[in-house]
């Protein structure tokens, strides 16, 4: 009987090891290098409409960088752009010297996302808007990573293009990040799960709420604990925290948020959750069934790569390295 139990245990362990190996081999992300054209952005500067992007490794030149990943967002993007414009106007009334940049990362869109962004910049004279077009779709995580690695702000925020989160809630994230900062390191992430305690408003469908609960449970099982909402697309980083996180990123699809949190935990970067006002916006690019399965497999691959030591955490590259190549 004991021999049978041992044999079954060995057999099960072998099957699990083989499955883990297959997941790591075939599901581990392999980000592509940055195309030369992706080192440039469009703006409304009449003399130099096409300019070279900044570099996260350099010193900050503005107070805030806003990175917006956008894929086929011609209909939803204007809502966010107007929200950002109102916020900037209000903040400049309080802080006349406030400076920022708005990086629209057009992730290989098939519609007029980039044209809509540029039209908004021309109409409202937004010289801070920088539009980047990816030659091939990377995925949301890839678009965010490429944008953050080009950011010039003392703080860097990425937010979803649909305007689901009230943009002025960034003030709460900034205040909490500055209070929690240690050695120039701080991350503040928006949360849609604390509204009962904060007075914020969250409007989501029952299906989305159930899926979020299921995903949170799965993430907790795989060892990412202490964060109630990993997937909210409203996250703020100090410049040094962004360097330590994004030059170590591998994931370019939806699960990239979890890799951010893992890297923050491994490097003991202070991280706080901040309640935000959020409402569900129609037009999501996610397929509930297909992308849920993909995210589950991607998350397992990410966890295994770090547990097995295949992915090492390195300091961000020296200034001589190519801005499109992260430490892998």
Image (cartoon, rainbow, N blue to C red):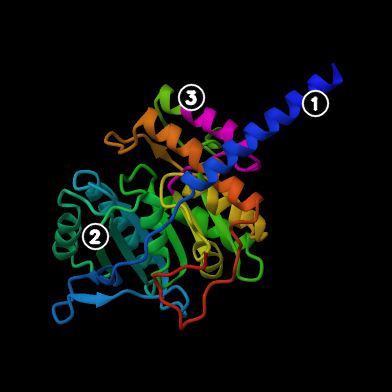
Is 38 placed left or right of 100 in the picture? left
Crowd band around label 2 with a 10 angstrom C-alpha radius: few (<14), some (14–19), many (20+): some
Disc ID at residue 210: 3
Q: Which mark is residue 106?
A: none
Q: Quadrant of the image for the N terminus?
A: top right
Q: Earlier in the sequence, mark 3 or mark 2?
A: 2
In the shown orientation, is residue 225 left or right of residue 200? Answer: right
Q: Is residue 16 above or below residue 85?
A: above
Q: Secondary structure at mark 1?
A: helix
Give the residue displayed 44% in from the left and 59% down from the top.
Answer: 157
Q: Which residue is mark 2?
A: 135
Label 1: which residue?
6
SS at mark 2 in the image = loop
Q: Position of residue 244 (x, y in %)?
A: 56, 66
Answer few, some or many: residues within 10 Å of disc 3's Cα (few below 14, many 20 plus, some between 14 and 19): few
Q: Residues within 10 Å of mark 1 (few under 14, many from 20)?
A: few
Q: Which range of residues does the magenta coloring cover? A: 210-233
Q: What's the CA distance linking mark 3 and mark 1?
A: 39 Å
> In this picture, is 281 found above or below 129?
above
User: What percent of the width, then of the height, locates residue 146?
Assistant: 38, 63
Question: Residue 255 location, x and y as percent?
Answer: 47, 45
* Contact between labelled residues 2 and 3, with CB atoms less than 8 Å apart: no
Do we see residue 264 in this rendering? Answer: yes
259 in magenta: no
Label 2 to label 1: alpha-carbon separation: 54 Å
Q: Secondary structure at mark 3?
A: helix
């Amino acid at each position: 009987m004991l021999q049978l139990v041992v044999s079954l245990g060995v057999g099960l362990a072998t099957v699990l090891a083989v499955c883990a190996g297959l997941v790591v081999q075939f599901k581990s992300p392999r980000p592509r290098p940055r195309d030369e054209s992706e080192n440039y952005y469009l703006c409304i500067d009449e003399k130099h409409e096409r300019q070279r992007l900044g570099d996260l490794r350099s010193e900050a030149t503005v107070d805030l960088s806003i990175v917006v990943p956008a894929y086929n967002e011609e209909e939803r993007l204007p809502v966010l752009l107007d929200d950002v414009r109102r916020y900037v106007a209000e903040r400049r009334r309080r802080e006349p010297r406030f400076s920022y940049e708005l990086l629209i990362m057009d992730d290989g869109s098939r519609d007029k996302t980039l044209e809509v962004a540029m039209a908004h910049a021309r109409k409202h004279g937004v010289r801070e808007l920088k539009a980047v077009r990816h030659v091939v779709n990377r995925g949301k995580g890839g678009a965010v990573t490429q944008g953050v690695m080009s950011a010039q702000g003392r703080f860097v925020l990425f937010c979803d293009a649909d305007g689901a989160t009230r943009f002025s809630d960034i003030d709460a994230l900034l205040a909490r990040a500055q209070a929690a900062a240690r050695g120039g390191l701080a991350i503040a992430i928006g949360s849609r799960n604390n509204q009962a305690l904060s007075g914020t408003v969250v409007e989501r469908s029952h299906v989305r709420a159930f899926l979020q609960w299921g995903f949170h449970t799965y993430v907790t099982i795989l060892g990412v604990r202490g964060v109630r909402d990993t997937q909210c697309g409203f996250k703020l980083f100090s410049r040094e925290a962004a360097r330590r996180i994004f030059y170590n990123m591998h994931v370019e699809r939806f699960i990239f948020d979890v890799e951010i949190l893992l890297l923050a935990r491994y490097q003991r970067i202070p991280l706080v959750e901040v309640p935000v006002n959020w409402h569900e916006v129609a037009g999501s690019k996610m397929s509930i069934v297909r992308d849920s399965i993909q995210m589950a497999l991607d998350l397992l691959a990410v966890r295994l790569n770090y547990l097995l030591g295949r992915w090492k955490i390195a300091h961000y590259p020296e200034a001589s390295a190519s801005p499109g190549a992260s430490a892998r």
